[in-house]
């Protein structure tokens, strides 16, 4: 008999195909991802040994407590895992895994797209063309901010931050960064390290956010941090909405302190603050940093690799806790 799996999130056809081929799989048929109640009910009725999900499922302590004893692994198709109560899973003996590494390049591509679109007013130009144009634009009108040769500050120099830094160097940008610790020279690649986040900010023409979410980084980019950036700076966030004080960001944008922002993530998703949509200076996308066919397939396959390993008696590839 094949191991039993609940596929609780919407994913690519190839990932669904492999899940069905390798496992006895319940595939959710609804228009959105399964709720906790639906996952628990499906796992109980199917006596599932594994759950495949993403960050739309809050696998907190109460949810974990209600899972049937058959569940041995929960694999999230994401790098971030703040939606999982890892200690609670460990206490139940449930292995939990994520999918690091496979989405770095795609997410860094998206961050650079947002940076360029925000700096060069891409959304405004597109709107003008879709409305028909038909008027002259003067030499002093609709001016953006030059990217090449500027200073880019990176908050969080993990795998995605480093991938983004490589792209920034392609535009001859001077790379500055802040993280919990300094990188070794072979990873730093000439970037300038700042042990104090606030000390870096006055030197940043652009700030790109790549730190993990969680209590330690909640509202790390607050009113004080934004005030330390040079006037006319541009901010990009493809990490987590929780990292930014959104009210402070709105104030910085409406006052002209910031020239623009490119935002892929928000504190409340999908019900984000619509005040951002009213600002011409903001380029928006709906948390799709990893949304290429190749990357989403790779993420789903990596999660299935983790499930296969655990259910065949091997160590997980990407465990979030170890004995």
Image: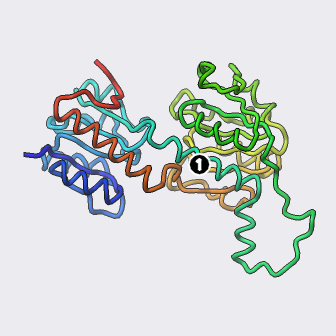
Q: Secondary structure at mark 1?
A: helix
Q: Residues within 10 Å of mark 1 (few under 14, many from 20)?
A: some
Q: Is residue 19 above or below residue 306?
A: below
> x, y percentage for residue 69?
15, 35
Q: Is residue 188 above or below residue 101?
A: above
Nearest to the observer: residue 85 or residue 29: 29
For the point 74% across and 80% down, the residue is: 132
Question: Residue 209 vs residue 71: left or right?
Answer: right
Q: By what rule are the colours in the image chosen?
A: rainbow
How many callouts does the rendering have? Answer: 1
For the point 18% across and 35% down, the residue is: 311
Question: Residue 264 vs residue 79: left or right?
Answer: right
> x, y percentage for residue 15?
31, 53
Quadrant containing the N terminus in the rendered view:
top left
Quadrant containing the C terminus in the rendered view:
top left
For the point 66% across and 45% down, the residue is: 236
> x, y percentage for residue 99?
39, 38
Nearest to the observer: residue 71 or residue 161: 161
Residue located beneath label 1 in the image? 109
For the point 75% across and 47% down, the residue is: 251
Nearest to the observer: residue 259 or residue 153: 153
> x, y percentage for residue 74?
28, 38
Question: Residue 226 vs residue 48: left or right?
Answer: right
């Amino acid at each position: 008999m094949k191991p039993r799996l609940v596929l609780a999130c919407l994913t690519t056809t190839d990932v669904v195909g492999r899940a069905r081929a390798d496992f006895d799989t319940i595939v959710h048929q609804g228009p959105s991802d399964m709720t906790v109640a639906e996952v628990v009910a499906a796992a109980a009725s199917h006596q599932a040994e594994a759950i495949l999900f993403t960050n739309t499922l809050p696998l907190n302590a109460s949810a974990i407590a209600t899972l049937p004893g058959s569940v041995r692994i929960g694999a999230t198709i994401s790098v971030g895992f703040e939606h999982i109560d890892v200690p609670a899973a460990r206490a139940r003996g449930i292995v939990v895994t994520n999918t690091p590494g496979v989405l770095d390049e795609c997410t860094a591509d998206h961050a650079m797209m947002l940076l360029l679109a925000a700096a060069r007013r891409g959304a405004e130009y597109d709107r003008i063309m879709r409305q028909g144009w038909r008027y002259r634009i003067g030499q002093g009108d609709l001016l953006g901010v030059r990217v090449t040769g500027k200073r880019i500050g990176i908050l969080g120099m993990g795998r995605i931050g480093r991938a983004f830094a490589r792209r920034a160097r392609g535009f001859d940008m001077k790379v500055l960064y802040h993280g919990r610790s300094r990188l070794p020279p072979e990873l730093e690649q000439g970037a300038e390290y700042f042990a104090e986040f606030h000390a870096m900010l006055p030197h940043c023409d652009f700030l790109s956010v790549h730190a993990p979410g969680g209590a330690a980084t909640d509202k790390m980019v607050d009113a004080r941090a934004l005030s330390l950036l040079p006037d006319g700076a541009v901010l990009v966030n493809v990490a987590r909405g929780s990292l930014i004080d959104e009210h402070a960001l709105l104030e910085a944008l409406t006052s002209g302190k910031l020239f623009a922002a490119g935002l892929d993530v928000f504190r409340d998703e999908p019900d984000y603050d619509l005040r951002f949509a009213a600002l011409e200076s903001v380029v928006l996308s709906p948390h799709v940093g990893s949304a290429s066919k190749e990357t989403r397939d790779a993420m789903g396959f990596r999660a299935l690799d983790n499930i296969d390993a655990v259910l065949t008696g091997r160590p997980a590839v990407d465990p979030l806790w170890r004995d």
